[in-house]
Amino acid sequence: MRRDTTLETALNSKAYKRSKRQTLREARMTEKLEKQQKIEQERKRRQKHQEYLNSILQHAKDFKEYHRSVAGKIQKLSKAVATWHANTEREQKKETERIEKERMRRLMAEDEEGYRKLIDQKKDRRLAYLLQQTDEYVANLTNLVWEHKQAQAAKEKKKRRRRKKKVEDNTEGIGSGLGPDGEPIDESSQMSDLPVKVTHTETGKVLLGPEAPKASQLDAWLEMNPGYEVAPRSDSEDESDSEYEEDEDDDESSRQEIDEKIHLDPNTEDVSEKDAKQIIETAKQDVDDEYSMQYSARGSQSSYYTVAHAIAERVDKQSSLLINGTLKHYQVQGLEWMVSLYNNNLNGILADEMGLGKTIQTIALITYLMDHKRLNGPYLIIVPLST
């Protein structure tokens, strides 16, 4: 507290304070200063807004100029491309007219060799294009056939293993007269009809298949034919399995060759003369003819026919069950093709003109299967009303 503080001053501190008088001059100066500050603030605000508007206008101008230049470049490029195509088309048309005139000139001059050469050059381009499209289709078809054969081979392998196990169980149960299920073998059981391989102890002659005795008649047959005994189980099934695995490896390598084969895939018919000749020469070397490649060496495994008809069987004549007529040569070839389809688990369509013998070829296939494959049916044959 201050020393000069009294009771009066303590109660009202402003009682002894002198207030400053505001003169008119000071009021005018204050008003003038305040007005200048407002004017300055308004000027800065307007200047900032004007700069913002100027930046927007400049950006719009630059944006418009940029897109105008881009549109101009695109227009020039389009015009140049159109001009190039027009010139190219004009040159091609001139070349075609020149070749046509040259061909007519040689024809009128009786230059047959030159005329044929020009014709062949024109055909080669179209032929090369068709061959390329055919190669694509055949490659896709070969891949599909390969996948189908792999699936069928896997099923066949499982079936072969089950059959192998059943034969082992049957061989073990023959001595005691029991089947693979441990029950006595009777005449009506399916296992009693299986042939049992026997061998002669002195000569080593082996009887199997239709010549071998059946399991139900084994004991009586051994008594009637002394010197024979049940042959020990060989490794033929194991060898067949190993051959099957080798075939799988061969199919895999064939698949790799198919995938690695390079095909030219033109989108137009504009193929150079060199490429056309190369494609045609390749097609001549890789003719996929079943009658010429079916029995050739396994050098072209990537061929469609060598993949699809891997199991080959030559058919030279019709079955002896088919009488009262003889198949023609092309019908025997059709029979051979259908037998190959059967051997390779494939489906096919025997399509030709009417009257060439599709029905008799089907009958020949059935008789062939009955005669050579011992398949007596039943067969499902769907015949259209027009047959």
Image: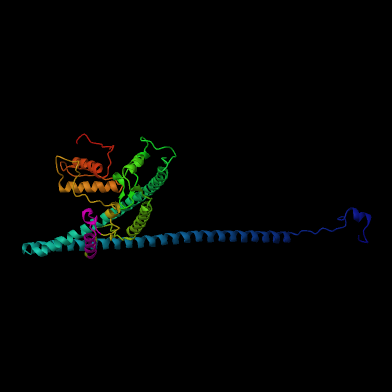
Q: Nearer the viewer, residue 14 or 190?
A: 190
> Which quadrant of the structure image shows residue 61?
bottom left
State yes or no: residue 276 in magenta: yes
Q: Is residue 96 visible?
A: no
Which residue is depicted at the point 73% across and 61% down?
26
Q: Main secondary structure of the magenta part?
A: helix
For this rendering, which residue is in front, 39 or 11? Answer: 11
Tell me if 58 is positioned left or right of 312 in this view. right
Depth check: 96 or 235 in front? 235
Q: Position of residue 232 (x, y in %)?
A: 38, 50
Tell me the residue at 36%/63% (across/down).
Answer: 73
Image quarter for residue 266? Answer: bottom left
Colouring: rainbow
* Marker count (numbered): 0
Query: Residue drawn 60% across and 58% down?
Result: 42
Residue 328, x across and y down, in percent: 15, 46
- In the rendered image of this protein, does residue 87 appear above or below residue 313? below
Quarter of the rendering containing residue 347 = top left
Q: Nearer the viewer, residue 386 or 207?
A: 207
147 relative position to 29: left or right = left
Q: Is residue 229 left or right of residue 268?
A: right
Q: Residue at x 82, y 58 (%)?
A: 19
Q: Is residue 104 above or below residue 227?
A: below
Q: Is the C terminus in the top left, top right, bottom left or bottom right quadrant?
A: top left
Q: Position of residue 329 (x, y in %)?
A: 16, 48
Q: Magenta span covers which residues?
A: 274-296
Quadrant occupied by the N terminus = bottom right
Q: Position of residue 272 (x, y in %)?
A: 23, 63
- Magenta segment includes 9: no
